[in-house]
Image (tube, rainbow, N blue to C red):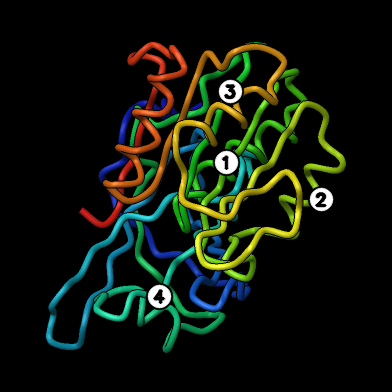
Amino acid sequence: MTDVSATTSGWQSCAIVEIASRTPAIKSFFLRLTEPFDYKAGQHVDVRLTGPDGYTATRSYSIASAPSGSDLIELAIERLADGEVSPFFHDVAQVGDMIELRGPLGGHFLWPGRTENPVLLIGAGSGVVPLMAMIRYRQASAEPVPVALLLSSRTSFDVLFRDELLELERSLPDFALALALTREPATRRTDFSRRIDPPMVADVAARLPAAPRSVLVCGSNPFVEAATDAALALGVEAGAIKTERYGI
């Protein structure tokens, strides 16, 4: 077995085998690894594009799929208007194209491992991707871990993995889902129609059978700061809060 706490330095070429539209701005790309690796939920890979003139652009993307031993991984990539890599994936990439990547990378922002202690996940937009890998792992492993996810999105159409999350809420024991919609009214009584704040985080944490012992937050820098402050206000120890930031 590969030691997934270490990074892999070598690059490999992987084929795009499927492309799925997730939201108006996000697509999932399913890549078949030529050199399969073991990884933990929460890790990411680096993707490298090389132009005809030799210019290269590299970006990091969290793995959305759960660790399974498969040679397929899913990357959910948001199209950024001023990006160098994401427009290629959204406007140019096709099934059959070969993509360079290396990984797995990252040893901090990870599912807490074998535990029965409640876990609180807080994400915004595409920041749900590594959290989704954790939820999928929780489902596949059937570990008895109560999990609550608070996910902030502009509208219900912008909720990444929306249908899957709603189905998991119906079918997965000890999983609670709360959406914070910032640009439209929420239609479910368990959701919110505002940006996250301490009372909201406290409300979602209270849906767990006990106080969360692990909190994982992923989003923009301001979002992470707000969510972390709210978790600390609940009495969660600082060392039990792990964060991952994008757009900085």
Provide the secondary structure element on which disc 2 rests. Answer: helix
Q: Which mark is residue 193?
A: none
**Is 214 in front, or is 27?**
214
Q: Residues within 10 Å of mark 4 (few under 14, many from 20)?
A: some
The mark lying in front, picked from 4 and 3, is: 3
Q: CA distance from mark 2 to mark 1?
A: 16 Å
**Is 111 in front, or is 165?**
165
Residue matched to label 2: 167
Q: CA distance from mark 4 to mark 3?
A: 30 Å
Q: CA distance from mark 4 to mark 1?
A: 23 Å
Q: Which mark is residue 150?
A: 1
Q: Looking at numbered disc 4 in the image, what kind of residue is underneath it?
A: Arg
* Pointer 4 with pointer 3, Cβ within 8 A: no
* Pointer 3 with pointer 2, Cβ within 8 A: no
Residue 206: image location, x then y, percent: 65, 22
Residue 171: image location, x then y, percent: 87, 40
Q: CA distance from mark 3 to mark 1?
A: 11 Å
Say which residue appears at 43% left-offset and 69% top-offset: 78
Q: Is residue 74 above or below residue 21?
A: above
* Pointer 3 with pointer 1, Cβ within 8 A: no
Q: Is residue 230 above or below residue 9?
A: above
The mark lying in front, picked from 2 and 1, is: 1
Q: Which mark is residue 79?
A: 4
Q: Earlier in the sequence, mark 2 or mark 1?
A: 1
Q: Looking at numbered disc 3 in the image, what kind of residue is underneath it?
A: Val
Residue matched to label 3: 119
Q: Residue furthest right?
A: 171
